[in-house]
């Protein structure tokens, strides 16, 4: 039937049961870098003669697509496509499918965990006690807290519902989401400035702007509540690193928690080494249930497109 390239780290040994429908349909799986993110050179070597690609978050260059001589479809096991050269795919007629919303629960739960860790200073307290100290920084309850959410897709909406269920007041900004996306007496749909102004917690769930410039800079950071918690499970580039580092040093931002980085693994930096920064290794959607849902949807999308091409 043909070759399918499989590159998400969670699937790249080819053994996940949700991949079985591909082999049962007669496709052979190409898994060039089990457990690792493939490099450009490794992708260029692996992609020729593959008619389908089950892709993760690995960067895909124009050169990789140029080497994809037989490719008909790329199926993401998630919703983000920032890593793909969309114009090149369109020009080549390569179809792009996404597994939208399938990892929303996992990412939203991690966002909530990072939010609570920041509000209660859990990481710094734990590290202090490991050093033999007895740190006691007064915390903030989520009940009554002002939560600003940028992006009301599946993840942002799920996180909003979590916060509302815990008694927070939530302000959400998203110029594209339906007006009835969240319904609750303590939820307000606002403009961007109102969503961030005075927020105790700011959570980011948006794509990068078309111009590639950060959404959150000095002005937005200064407008947050003093000691605010910022959680980023979307894209590292949404925040100006230099402005954020200054806000952390000044105490305007009390905690920055991030699951996303400019490169993975990230290069060491003053920002990531800051004592008020909490990092996780892009594990938002890395739960058994999220991987299962995302893989099944991605496989269904591959089979759907390749069946169309076969007719």
Image: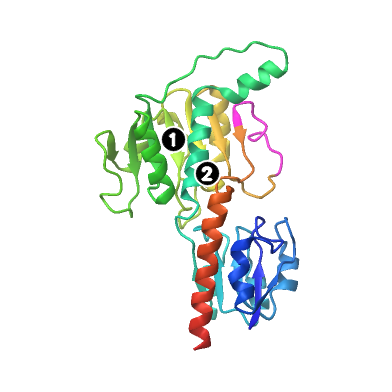
Q: Position of residue 300 (x, y in %)?
A: 51, 69
Question: Label 1, on which residue?
Answer: 202
Taking the magenta stretch, the answer to whether it contains residue 210 is no
Q: Residues within 10 Å of mark 2 (few under 14, many from 20)?
A: many
Kindly state the secondary structure of the residue where label 1 is placed: strand
Q: Residues within 10 Å of mark 1 (few under 14, many from 20)?
A: many
- For this view, does 150 lie left or right of residue 213? left
Nearest to the observer: residue 20 or residue 172: 20
Q: Against 48, is 233 above or below?
A: above
Q: Name the residue at 41% across, 45% down.
A: 156
Residue 100 showing in the rendered view: yes
Taking the magenta stretch, the answer to whether it contains residue 268 is yes
Q: Position of residue 176 (x, y in %)?
A: 33, 55
- For this view, does 184 lie left or right of residue 267? left
User: Residue 164, located in which quarter of the rendered image?
Assistant: top left
- For this view, does 272 lie left or right of residue 310? right
Q: Count all numbered tags in the image, as a single digit.
A: 2
Q: Name the residue at 61% across, 13% down.
A: 135
Q: Name the residue at 68% across, 81% down.
A: 49
- For this view, does 266 lie left or right of residue 175? right
Q: Are marks 2 and 1 in contact (CB under 8 Å)?
A: no
Nearest to the observer: residue 238 or residue 285: 285
Disc ID at residue 233:
2
Q: Against 153, is 149 above or below?
A: above
User: Residue 270, located in which quarter of the rendered image?
Assistant: top right
How far is mark 2 from mark 1, CA to CA? Answer: 11 Å
For the N terminus, the image quarter is: bottom right
Q: Nearest to the eye among marks 2 and 1: give it.
A: 2
Q: Give the magenta range.
A: 267-277
Q: Name the residue at 34% across, 24% down.
A: 144
Kindly state the secondary structure of the residue where label 2 is placed: loop
Mark before the other along the chain sequence, 2 or 1: 1
């Amino acid at each position: 039937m043909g070759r399918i390239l499989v590159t998400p780290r969670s699937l790249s040994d080819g053994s996940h049961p949700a991949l079985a429908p591909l082999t049962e349909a007669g496709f052979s799986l190409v898994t060039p870098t089990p457990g690792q993110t493939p490099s450009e050179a490794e992708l260029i070597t692996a992609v020729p003669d593959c008619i389908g690609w089950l892709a993760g978050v690995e960067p895909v260059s124009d050169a990789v697509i140029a080497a994809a001589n037989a490719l008909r479809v790329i199926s993401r096991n998630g919703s983000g496509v920032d890593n793909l050269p969309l114009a090149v795919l369109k020009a080549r007629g390569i179809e792009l499918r996404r597994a939208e919303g399938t990892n929303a629960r996992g990412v939203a739960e991690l966002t909530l965990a990072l939010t609570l860790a920041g509000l209660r200073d859990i990481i710094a307290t734990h590290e202090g006690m490991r050093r033999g100290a007895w740190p006691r920084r007064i915390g903030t309850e989520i009940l009554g807290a002002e939560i600003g959410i940028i992006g009301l897709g599946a993840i942002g909406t799920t996180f909003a519902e979590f916060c509302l269920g815990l008694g927070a007041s939530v302000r959400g900004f998203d110029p594209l989401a339906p007006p009835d996306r969240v319904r609750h007496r303590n939820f307000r749909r606002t403009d961007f400035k109102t969503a961030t102004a005075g927020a105790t917690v700011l959570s980011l769930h948006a794509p990068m702007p078309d111009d590639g410039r950060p959404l959150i800079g000095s002005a937005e950071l200064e407008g947050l509540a003093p000691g605010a918690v910022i959680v980023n499970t979307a894209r590292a580039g949404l925040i100006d690193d230099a402005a954020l580092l200054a806000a952390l040093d000044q105490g305007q931002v009390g905690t920055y928690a991030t699951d996303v980085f400019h490169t993975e693994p990230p290069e060491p930096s003053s920002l990531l080494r800051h004592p008020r920064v909490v990092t996780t290794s892009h594990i938002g959607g890395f739960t058994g249930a999220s991987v299962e849902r995302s893989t099944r949807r991605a496989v269904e999308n591959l089979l759907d497109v390749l069946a169309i091409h076969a007719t």
